[in-house]
Structures are given as C-alpha cells and as structure tokens.
Image (cartoon, coloured by chain):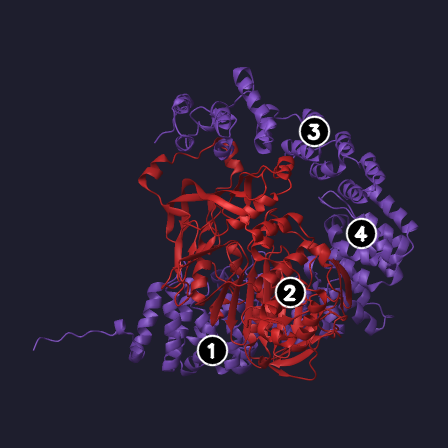
Amino acid sequence: MIVGVDYASPSVFRTDGSAALLGMAVDAARPVRFHGRLMRDIFLVRVALRALGEVIRSDETLSLVDILDPVITVHPDRIFFEAFSQDQSVYANVSLDRDLFALQGEMVTGTTNVDFTDGLSNALGDMRSSRETWLRIDPGGFEVATVGSGGHFEAKVDVPDEWVRGFLEVQGAMALPGTHLRVRPVDLLAAIRYLRFTRARLSPRALRYEMQPGEDARIVLEPWEHAIPLKGAAHGFGEPRVIRTWGRRRLRLLEPLLPFADSVDIFLKGRALPSFYGVRMGGLRFILGLTGWSGRSWSGGAAFELLSGAGADPAPAALVATARQRLREMFAASPQEMATALAVPVPEAARLLQRLCRLGHAFYDVEERRFRHRELFAEPIDEARLFPPDPRTEAARELLARGAATVAACTPVEKRKVRKLPTPEGKVAREIILRDWEVTGAVAGEPQVQQVQIVVDERGAIRFGRCGCDFFQDNLLNLGPCVHMLALYAASAGERRDLATSAAATEGARARQGPPPGGFEREEEEEEVLEDEEDGGGAEDGQP
Amino acid sequence: MAPKSSREVETLVRSVLHEPLEDAVLRERLEELGQEPAFPGLTWLWGPELYRRNRVLFRPLILSRFGTWEWRGGWSSIRRIEWKGETGRILDAWMAEADRLDDGELFRQLYLWKNPRSEESWERDLVERFRAASGSAARLSALDKLDLRWWMLGQDTAIALYETDPRAAAPFILKHLPERGTGLWRDLMARARQRGDEGFALTLYRNLIESRPWVDDLRELCDRIADPAALCRALERHYPTGSMWDFDSGPGLIEVLRRRGRDVLPFVLPHLWDARNRWRLRGGANDLLRIARDHDWIDLWAAVLRTIATPDQVDAELRQLLKDPGRPPADVVRRLAALAGGGRIGSGPRGLSSVLTVKDATAVLLYERFPDLVRGPFKSHVAEGSPVRLTRAAIDARDEELVDFLASRMATRTGWGSGRVDEAEPLADEYAQLKASDPAAFSRRAAAVLGQIPAFSIFSYDRLVRSNRLARLLFERSAESFLADPGMVEDLLEAPEIHVQALAYRVLGLDDPRARQLAAARLDLLLATLLRPLHRTTRLLAFAALANAARVSAAAAARILARAREAFDLPDRGYPKEELAGLLGHILRLWPELRGPRERPVVWGSAA
C-alpha cells in the first residue's frame, strides 16, 4: 500500500537554559495544529514519548521494511500518539490530557502522520521539568537554520499490506470483550524483572494469568511455574479461569514507565489473542498492545479470524458511512451513544464501530471503553486486497454456526524432561512438561470426513492433522489446514486448557536424566540452551 | 550414572521392541532409553520399526532422537553410520515408506544420510521426481521432500522445474538461488517473461545481478523512460536485493545521475547509505561531490558528505566553503545547515545519521564566522574530535553555552578510547577559578554541564574521578553548592546519565534543611528509585534522600512507606533489602503513627 508523507521540515526539539520547544512536523497533506504549553507532568511526557520511540525501534526480526510514521490524533479532550512496530507485534498509544496544556491559538483537530525519528527520540532526553516547555504540532514545519536540517522531505512509502493488516487487526482486537485486571505497577514489574534475570530459551515460555474465585489474580511464569500474586487485582470470576499469553519479553518496553506509574490496567482478550497494558501516569496514559499470535504462522490468521469473529457479517456500506460521519462529529462514542445517534440497536452500533476500526477510521480507547474517530490513512484502504476473503475460513465459520463440528476427544499429550532453569536464587532443576493437544472429532453431513484429527501445540498452532477430505488428501498440510480442521480447531478452543508447564523434579526424574542426549546433530538442531542474561543482575539504567 | 555402551543400549532396545507392550508404554520406555547418548546412533534399528508400528504416535520421538553417528563411549570417538549392507537395506525400505507417505521431514533426514554431499544427484532427483509427480499438490510434496537448506540449484535444473510447473517451482527456486557472482540466469528470466511472469523474472534479476551489467541496464532504462517518476519506479524495481555485501552500487548511482540529473535524485538519495562502506573505502565520494558541485545540488552534496565521504573530505569541503570570499554568508549558512543533518535525506534507516568529525582548526574557523551554528546543529560534530583550540576560543569569547557543552563531553574522558584526558585541563582550570570567584555562578554552570552528559557515557566512575580533574571537580567536590538553587537539583535528578542522578541523590541526602525540603518536593522522582533497576551504591544514595524527605511531613513519609513496602516484592538480584528494611524502620521511628498493627512494639510488664 503506497502512502505519501510530506513534511515541511524535520521535527525538532530545541532547548536553552529556560525554555524548550517540542516541534512536531506533520504531514502537510493532512494539516493538524496544536500549540500549547505543558503545565505539568513534563518529565512523564518525556518518559512516555521515549517509550513510544522504543516501540517504533523494537523489532525482533531485524527487517528494514518501510512502515508508516507514527500517527498523531488531536481531539478536543486528548492528544493521541500511535505507533506500530516494524515486526508487527507491538502497538503503542500515548494519550495526553488536554488539561496538561495551556493552549495557544487555534487548535485544528484531526489525524496525521508525524516525523518521529530516532534522533528526535534521543533529543527528548533533554526535556526538563524546570523549563517552560511547549508542544507545537504544525504542518508548516520549523525554522531549521539553528536546529538541524534536512529541510523538506516528501516520500511515497510502500507500506507492506501485512503490516497494515496487523495494525488494523490490533485495533479491532482492542474492542473485543475480555478480562480486565487493575494491578499494582510493582507486580507487573516483578514479572518483568524475573524474566530479566532469568531467561529461558526452553519452551514453554508463556505468561499465564490465573484467576481463582475469591482470590486475587496472579501471573505464572513458565517454565518455572513462578507465581506472582497481583495484589488487589479483582476479577469477579465464579469459576477458575486461565488465560495464557505469549511474547512476554515485549513487556520490557513498559519497564521504564512502571516505576513512575500510578496504576496498570491489563486487558486480556483470550488465549493467544492480543493483550493490552494501560499504564496511568498523572495526566498521561500509555497503552501497550501485544499481538498474541505469530503473523507468520500459517494457521494464525485463520485462527484469529475464527476465534475473534473479525470480518464476519459485514454491515451495509451506507450505514458504515453514516456511522463514520457521526463519529467524526462526536470524536468519541460508546456503542450505546452511537446506537442513540443512529437509532439502531446497540449490538448493531457495536458492529458498525468495530468495522470502522477494521477500515482504519477509528480506534478503540480501552480505558474509556469508547471508540475514537481516527483516519489512519488519507485515502480509504482497499479492503478487498487487505482482507481477501478466505474461502476455508468462511466455510469453517459456517460449519461452526451450524454446530456441525463436534469434538470427540481432546487429550493432552505430554513429554517431560528435567532441565536446570536459572532463577534469581540460582539454578533449580524442574521437570518441564511439553504439552500438545490431540483433538479428534467429526463433521456432520460430510460422509468422507468420518474422523478429523489435529495436534495443536502450546501456542495454538496446528502442527499435525489428518482428514479424509479431498483438500487434505491433495495437499496434506502444504497449503494449511482444511476446512474441517479449522472448524475442529475453533470448536475445541474451550477444551484445550492451560495447565502447569513444569513441576518440581522428582528423584526418579533426576535419575533418568543422563548426559546431553542425542549426539552432536541433535544438539545443533534443538534450541534447548538455557542461558543467563549477561547484563541481568546489576544492570542500571539511565533516566528514561 | 555412567552412560551405557552402544552394545548395551542395542540389547536393551531389541528387548524392549520384542516385549508385548502397548504403544504408549513402549514410547515411555524408549523415551527413557532415549536419554542414553548411544540411543540416536541406533536409529536404523528402532526408527523403521516404530514408524511402521504407529507413525502418528512415534514420529515425534523418531524426529527428536534421529541420529546418524554411532557413539562409542566418548564424545571424541564417534563414527558415522554407513548406509550399506543390511543396515542400508533396512534404511532403504524405511525411506521408501516415508516417501510413499509424503513424510517430508523424515524423508529429508534420510535423504541427507544417504547422500551427504551430493548436490548433483540432488538436482537430478529433484527434476526426476518433480516431473514424475502428477498434479500440483504432488509436485509441491516432491519439492518439500528435497527442500534441503543451503543446497543451491543450477540454472538448468531451475529451468527444468520451472518449465514443468512454474507456480509450484518459483518459490523453491528463489529459496535455492546461488550466491551473486555466478551469473545472471538470463534463460530462465526469458522463459518467465514469455509466460508473463515479470515479477519472478525481476526477483531473479535483483538477487543475481552483478555491478557491471547492472550499470548497463540502468543506462538503458535512463535512455528509454522519459517520465521522471516512471523512471524512478523502474530503477527501484531493478535495485538489487538479498545479500548486498558483495555488490557495489556506487557506479550505477553515478551513471544514472550523469544521464538524468535531478530526475533520479529520489532514487539515488535513499540508496547512498547502502553504498556507504564500499565507496568510503575507495574514496568514491569525489565523483558524486563533483556532480553535486557542478549542478549546485545542495541536497546531494550534503547527503554525500554525511554518508560516504571520509573525515578528510568533509574537512576539505568545509574549509573550502568557509574560506570562499565570493560566497554570500546566507548561502554558506544554507549549505552548512543542510550538512549538519537532522532530517531524513542522506540518513540511514529511520533517520539514523552519523556524526561528522570536524577537525579542530576547521571548527575554530566555523566558530569565528558562524558561532550560532556551532552552538546549534554543529555542536555534536565539533565535539567529536579533539576540540582543544575551539575550547580555548569559546572560553576567550566567554561563550558559556558552548563551554558548558564542551565540558559535558570532556568530563567523561578517562583516557580509554574517548579522547585524551589532558584536553579537559583548561576547562578544569576555568571551572575551578569560577568556583573560587563566584560560587553561585559555578553551581549554575556545573549543573548545566552535568545535565548535558549523555546517558551511558561513563563506564568506570572510579577511574573517571581518579584521572579527570574536571570530573572530580563537578562530581565530587561540589555537592553542597547545588543546594543554592532548587531548579538545578531538579535538572540533575532528571539528567540522562545515571551518575549525575546519583550525584543528585547524594545532594538530597545531605544533612541540610534545604536538602530535606527539596527531596520532599520531588518525591515523585525519588519514589521511582525504589523500583528502578539501580546499582547498590546508587540505590543507597537514593535511600538517604528518601529518608531525608520522610522527615519533612507524615504525608511524605506515608507515601515512601507504601512504595518501600511494595519494593520488597521485587525479585531483583542484589537489591539491598536489609537497607530497605532499615529505611522503613527509620521512617516508622520518626512517625510512630504510621506503624501498622504488626509494627507496633509490644511491651510486656510484670504480672500484677
């Protein structure tokens, strides 16, 4: 997808002994203006914007594809900065209360791209509370003679479709129903620090939220089964509930913020689905969204579509256009407010708002639980190209709706091995339990599909499968799972429970443990090396 | 327990296989035996048997314990198991079965075992199997079975595959292309174009093209396409991809500039960074600078100097510009501003740009003519080398802003790779004199210097204060003087460098009423030190500051208590929890009303 940006000058951070200006150059084609003096929380603004810069930089794949510059949205009550990482796994949203500022001149609301380079992110380190600090968002650019140069910059950025799709799907996922926990910053920090001191390359490596009735929620770190109580985190569940999330190392992006945070809200959307962490600091909020599935996994996209219901039953285009216009006027709306505005039932309004997210016209503010108007692109996206209909997903959805897919058995297949794991207290031996789920079932009304079998690994990817249908016989799994496997996968989601992933190593288990098994070839193939982080224990940071 | 010999394990495996066991029990027994180092070397024995018995159940065990080396009682005495005789016959049958069942992963392992280093036969097998397969799915399966990592195709094989089924073969071919430098596959590209598969042809081109023919192709594009935007798009489509370490893009960029001038700048500027290392080695910036000068293209000139030019070339250009008497000052400023950087043109990915090294004499020349530029966009460039004369000039000119900035760089020098430490001496003299003559001004200036020290620029604090007089003066001998101005301490607290923050904690921990008031006023930042990752020494200084703040009011003490209690939950290694308990005790002694029920002392009296 080709996206044009046109900056009159680079963004600047200019400071002298008594005053500072954060001048954000924005796309001239989408003029948005704001000029105000920061009256408080200057240091927290610096911390939050530098963390946003870290998100933009964070990329575990080390790819250098073009991505969209961060997006800035000015609303009458808040200013939002949004960014999505290059590897499509982290979303960040920094929002500043309007009352942090003493406004100067006219404010032009809207959404645009902002020039936010590494250089600017580093320069923000010079922000100081003692100086009069101004934020100016201006498409006209800034005087460059004394602050750096580069001048006018115009580019057509070929943003990968995958990246755009990931960004939009994260937006949609924010509005999914889920579990909300309000936790103390120190508890989340304790989990991050534990992982900082002890790093396992050994699966399983999920971060598990456990909710027992009548008790506070807790985080369990795998494979150590190390539990961190989330003091005061009420959940309200009447029966035990476990939600497992992956990609926990990305939580380190929050580490510089948490010592300054007032509270943290965690929004869990379900097993292996995206999770969101909202950090409140004075008049700021920082939302970190972590994708819960692997973008490269061939089963991931279909599974997300099926489990989240995204893309199902699209609303009429005319109604979507009306909703978009109303949201533009209202700036923010809950489904109830939109239902009133459009005179439609609340579920219909919710579906419309969800669709606006998918099309890039809105995003969901998880903390306020309202949808915000935000045009991600100047031009409408080509939905047909970005979200091509997947016939197999559609057919699987139909089977599920008819209740045709039935699960006969869903059994865990465990493999155990004793490994020494690093912990802050030294190495401990634990018996690691690697657990796949073997699911068998059938699809009614299709005689050749007498029995469908899938093996789902701990991350929710279909690793193995068998089916009697022609598609499977022709392709095996070379083109991904067949319709029946997908239906069985979704139908068995509730039965694939998250259980403990390690146990204290018994004497028997230890006795069985010999020298490194498998010889040289196997040692090279399997990544079962456990290593301490070299900079772990005594690492000291600079000021964020 | 000592590992068993290969013979012993073989006996055990045979006996387990002969026992009438349930599959699940058998797997468990073999998992146990699988811990023996000799077990993988017996794959030929247990692998085929288990695969035939229940491939769904045993396949993970087979793949995880698959081995082709026999272990003979020590890691130094291993032997590759030959695929011959009776073993070969057993393995041949197993391989045929894996082939029949389209078990790609297992087949690949067996194939590599049988044909360890034979790319020629691999290519032959590929073509034979691919052609023999009926239907697209079967062809995909054939490729999957021989998808051996790192093995490279020849063009003839690639053509044979592509001609048979282009859709199935194209991704496989791209995955197994040879290194650049083995020639362009023009025949295959022509066949792709005949089929209208321009995308595949161009991908082959971009992966295999070498520098010299690439220049010829660019020349042809420049001559053929008149529209500048269309030309840039076409040039972009022909830009090499994949491994670039052996590709010299410089001559191509020069050629397109010569032919089409400014039309192609949108194509050239973003790719200067790619050409950086090779060009720099050859001093290749001269040709581009000549083109930029001849046409007066400031953007190209500045981008070349920032990305490709050597320090000597940068210096020569700067001097020439500054000494040109005929050039209007406004024009010089415009060029210098472009050169200083900060924008995206001529920068690396995401605006990454390098710091220019401006030589001292040139920096002085620049300062004499345009001091604002030296204080502004050039300040990081002039501080990079040895700015001894510039420092002198700034001191003489009483340019506080520049002197403080230069001092912030000199104050981190230890003599280890960061420049000579004796170059900081004039600045040490300057600040020492100031301290003696005007303590208030010294405090203000010292805070300005310390606040500009970049994060992570001090590696050994002890060595720094031992070897650098300026650092000693600023860090060790001025703590109390900062209390004169609360704003200065705040700035130090928010400084990026951790040792500067530590200095601020030391100041706030002083036994002085001003320190106590200041500590209570910035409790928000001090509270964070309880949770931030800090070295023990730094954290103890922060504890002292917190203890000071707690003396000011019960409200401040209550906030500290709440956060300190939370900090006990951190698993940080080396966190001084005893001292944290000491801090808690200190606060509770000061404010007994803040004690919880379990923190109140119980005094036992004698029985009445």
Q: Which is nearer the N-term, disc 4 or disc 3?
A: 3
Q: Nearer the viewer, residue B310 or A349?
A: A349
Q: Using the rendered view, name the quadrant where residue B419 is placed.
A: bottom right
Q: In the figure, B237 relative to B448: above or below?
A: above
Chain identifier of the residue bearing label 3 in the image:
B
Chain identifier of the residue bearing label 2 in the image:
A
Left or right: B224 as drawn, with respect to A200: right
Q: Mark 2 points at which residue?
A: A357
Callout 3: SS = loop
Chain identifier of the residue bearing label 4 in the image:
B
Residue B212 location in percent, x, y? Answer: 83, 42
Q: Which of marks 1 and 4 is in front?
A: 4
Callout 1: SS = loop
Structural distance between the alpha carbons of marks 1 and 3: 75 Å
Residue type pointed to by label 3? Ala
Structural distance between the alpha carbons of marks 4 and 3: 38 Å
Residue type pointed to by label 4? Glu
Q: Name the residue under label 4.
A: B236
Circle number at residue B522:
1
Residue B245 location in percent, x, y? Answer: 71, 44
Q: Chain B is drawn in which colour?
A: purple
Structural distance between the alpha carbons of marks 1 and 2: 41 Å
Q: Colour of chain A?
A: red
Q: Mark 3 points at which residue?
A: B133
Q: How crowded is mark 1: few (under 14 residues within 10 Å), some or many (20 or more)?
A: some
Structural distance between the alpha carbons of marks 1 and 4: 54 Å
Residue A539 location in percent, x, y? Answer: 47, 58
Q: Which of marks 1 and 3 is in front?
A: 3
Residue type pointed to by label 2? Cys
